[in-house]
Image (tube, helix red, strand yellow):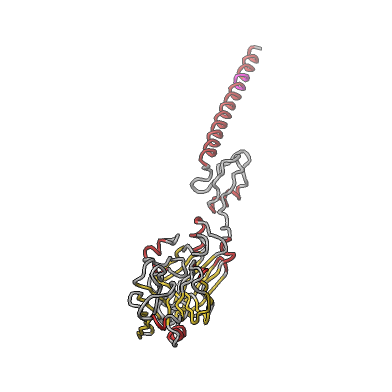
């Protein structure tokens, strides 16, 4: 009895010791699990290093764990152990800005050396998306060309609705250019024609035209005092055989309203270089217009009109206020450094 009793006591003691040891090990396991769970909650650290998960009670299949480790996608989200979400980089959302994108140059067109590539949108592009938009605008040329995009505040559009590309200096004649707008699936091919640069000196009432290495001087009349022609560099946007001009549209009351011929369009605000009967008397002598540049109707205006194409350059010197960048194509009135600064990728 004593022996059995003694043996039974030892067995009981061992049982109690075993249960105590198991309890202690369970406490240590629970403590370790809690510590890891806390670390996950605070740092999302599952998968740190080689992308291997810290598994909880409901471990994912081993094959999945290996796949996570190989792809580096095993970072946990701090959720319940064994159910952490795999971090997958979302696909970029298509930019809505390109839904109404337009380019100012027609496919196959020949333009002058000053023509910027202008892309406009139906709605303003938020600043946060402009870099992404620029990355989808590609320019290819067959001659070495340094250029940059720049966001332009158009006179008639909201900020963020227009972005232009221009070279550092005027395009080289004969250059073939391709524009690709990835977000809109648009492509334009065009060619730079011969160089024509006309310089209007309002103080001397003359226009000097440099074309294909030749120079000609033409008498003109520019804006009268108080109605001065814009100073600075403008680019021909289009031309029309006849244009109806109404002074009320530019705030000059009932000063004029009628048709004017051989009109070369320079600004969105209404500046033209066109035929004007007053130039028969005043060209080369006095500035008498309401801001446009007038040429005589003895064939002078027609001869200039016939040789001009969109993209040709008209520079005005000796006047007062410089034309705004977004008033037509005033891009060349900014220095190269300031122009580049208008790009979100600069």
Residue 293 percent location from the top left of the image: 42, 76
Q: Is residue 163 above or below residue 217?
A: above
Q: Main secondary structure of the magenta part?
A: helix
- Say left or right for 98 vs 302: right
Q: Magenta includes 198?
A: no
* Furthest residue in direction right, as rendered: 1
Q: Nearer the viewer, residue 43 or 296?
A: 296
Residue 273 sits in which quadrant?
bottom left
Magenta residues? 11-15
Q: Quadrant of the C terminus?
A: bottom left
Q: Nearer the viewer, residue 29 or 15?
A: 29
Residue 140 percent location from the top left of the image: 46, 73
Q: At 44% from the left edge and 84% from the top edge, which residue is drawn?
A: 301
* Furthest residue in direction top, as rendered: 2
Residue 53, visible in the rendered structure: yes
- Say left or right for 119 vs 323: right
Residue 241 percent location from the top left of the image: 52, 82
* Furthest residue in direction bottom, as rendered: 299
Residue 332 percent location from the top left of the image: 40, 69
Q: Is residue 4 above or below residue 155?
A: above
Q: Is residue 230 above or below residue 312?
A: above
Q: At 38% from the left edge and 81% from the top edge, which residue is drawn?
A: 283
Residue 146, visible in the rendered structure: no
Q: Quadrant of the N terminus?
A: top right
- Say left or right for 90 vs 154: right
């Amino acid at each position: 009895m004593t022996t059995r009793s003694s043996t039974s006591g030892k067995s009981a003691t061992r049982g109690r010791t075993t249960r105590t040891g198991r309890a202690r090990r369970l406490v240590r396991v629970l403590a370790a699990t809690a510590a890891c769970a806390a670390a996950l909650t605070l740092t999302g650290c599952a998968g740190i290093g080689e992308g291997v998960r810290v598994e909880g009670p409901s471990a994912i299949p081993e094959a999945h764990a290996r796949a996570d480790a190989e792809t580096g996608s095993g970072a946990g989200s701090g959720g319940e152990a064994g159910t952490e979400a795999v971090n997958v980089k979302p696909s970029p959302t298509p930019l809505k800005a390109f839904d109404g994108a337009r380019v100012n140059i027609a496919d196959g067109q020949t333009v002058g050396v000053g023509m910027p590539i202008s892309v406009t949108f139906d709605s303003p592009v938020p600043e946060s998306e402009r870099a992404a938009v620029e990355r989808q605008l590609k320019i290819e040329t067959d001659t070495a060309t340094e250029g940059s995009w720049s966001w332009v505040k158009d006179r008639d559009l909201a900020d963020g609705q227009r972005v232009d590309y221009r070279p550092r200096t005027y395009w080289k004649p004969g250059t073939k250019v391709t524009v690709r707008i990835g977000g809109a699936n648009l492509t334009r091919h065009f060619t730079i024609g011969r160089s024509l640069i006309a310089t209007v000196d309002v103080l001397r009432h003359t226009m000097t035209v440099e074309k294909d290495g030749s120079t000609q001087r033409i008498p003109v009349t520019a804006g009268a005092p108080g109605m001065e022609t814009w100073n600075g560099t403008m680019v021909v946007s289009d031309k029309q055989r006849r244009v109806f001009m109404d002074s009320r549209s530019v705030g000059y009351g009932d000063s004029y309203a009628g048709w004017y011929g051989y009109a070369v369009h320079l600004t969105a605000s209404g500046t033209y270089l066109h035929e004007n009967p007053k130039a028969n008397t005043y060209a080369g002598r006095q500035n008498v217009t309401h801001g446009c540049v007038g040429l005589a109707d003895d064939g002078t205006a027609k001869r200039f009109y016939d040789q001009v194409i969109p993209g040709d350059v008209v520079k005005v010197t000796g006047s007062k206020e410089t034309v705004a960048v977004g008033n037509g194509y005033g891009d060349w009135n900014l220095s190269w450094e300031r122009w580049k600064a208008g790009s979100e990728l600069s």
